[in-house]
Amino acid sequence: MAKKTRVREAHAQGSQSAGENPRRPCPCGSGKRYKACHGAGDDVIVIRPFEGLAAECDLVALREFLPSAKAPLPLKDARDRVVTLASVLPGASAALVRPDGEILVGMQVQTRSGDLSADLARALTWGFAAEPGTSLPVVPPSAEGGERLQDLLVADAALDVTLFSDFAWWVPPNEDGSEPTAEVMSTLERANAVIMPTEPVVAPGVRAAYWVDTGTKAHLRWVRPEPEDALLAALARLQARGELGLGENTRYAGSFRAHGLLVPVWDLDRDLHPKEWSEPVGAFATKLDAALKETTPLTDAERRAKDALAGKQITLR
């Protein structure tokens, strides 16, 4: 009880600030307005549910915009089980246990409480107790004093995320060698039809940065771990110097907030291959790291740039 109370107290201020504008998006990440989601009850929202985990940025990406991806979950005690975290599972299930005993936990699910970390911990607990071949459609209600993901994961372990071009990994091979049923294949076809091509941008000093093709534009979406004010100040310094772009035919589009972190977004040249962005993004990462370390007060131009950047909030489609 005391542990849950500390969590509630630590995040009560963020919940109250959300309540000041009931028409704003709910901080839980459901995509609904606050008044139609957690603003309708007394559940306290944990604004930054993955705080303290080295995998925080990866978890936010898996929850918010990675279409088909999974990663081994670095648990303190996996109990000799294979445990995998997935962007989304069939039917948007919260978890499932395969016939071979592998536990899969889904990130993109119906939000059940104001604490996504606790929801995931409950899905994991269910997986360890469930029978092979069963699934959990929705996370069960929370219990006072329950575990959170921070209690179960190795805190300093990042996630080794693998992206896929489709959802074929949803269907493991049948032991008898038979083909999947027509219903299963139809489900896969529908899921595959809405995937936006996504690839990681790999470069020194770069993590949780992804190239995404929306069909009309290409973007870089980069989950950043810094406090929002510090990140905006660093971006403003670069903007004032004319160094906020990633090269020719690129443009800083704005940012969106996701689970307590800021995700800057750039428009990219769609004709270039995703791997061609490794060098320019790596070079920008070096500039951004240097700007984050600057301690001198912002100049007038930098303050104006920061105010402008703070207003460039975008919405994922």
Image (cartoon, rainbow, N blue to C red):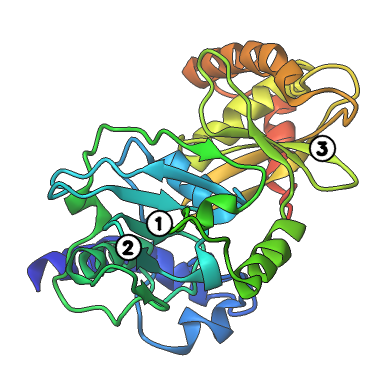
Nearer the observer: mark 3 or 2; the answer is 2
Task: Say which residue label 2 marks.
Answer: 99
Secondary structure beneath label 3: strand
> On the rendered image, what quadrant is the N terminus found in?
bottom left
Task: Say which residue label 1 marks.
Answer: 175
Q: Position of residue 108 (x, y in %)?
A: 51, 62
Q: Are marks 1 and 3 in contact (CB under 8 Å)?
A: no
Return the residue found at the far left: 2
How far, Cα to Cα, is label 3 from label 2?
A: 39 Å
Image quadrant where residue 225 sits: top left
Q: Residue at x 15, y 43 (%)?
A: 76
Q: Amino acid at mark 1?
A: Glu
Q: Amino acid at mark 3?
A: Ala
Q: Are there few (<14), some (14-19), or many (20+) residues within 10 Å of tag 2?
A: few
Q: Amino acid at mark 2?
A: Pro
Using the rendered image of the protein, determine whether residue 194 is visible from the camera's viewpoint: no
Image quadrant where residue 266 sits: top right
Residue 8 as seen in the image, left or right of residue 274: left
Q: Are marks 3 and 2 in contact (CB under 8 Å)?
A: no
Q: Position of residue 205 (x, y in %)?
A: 50, 16
Q: Is residue 202 above or below residue 171?
A: above
Q: Are there few (<14), some (14-19), or many (20+) residues within 10 Å of tag 1?
A: few
Q: Are marks 2 and 1 in contact (CB under 8 Å)?
A: yes
Q: Which mark is residue 282?
A: none
Nearer the observer: mark 1 or 3; the answer is 1
Using the rendered image of the protein, determine whether residue 165 is visible from the camera's viewpoint: yes
Q: Is residue 37 above or below residue 300?
A: below
Task: Say which residue label 3 marks.
Answer: 218
Secondary structure beneath label 1: loop
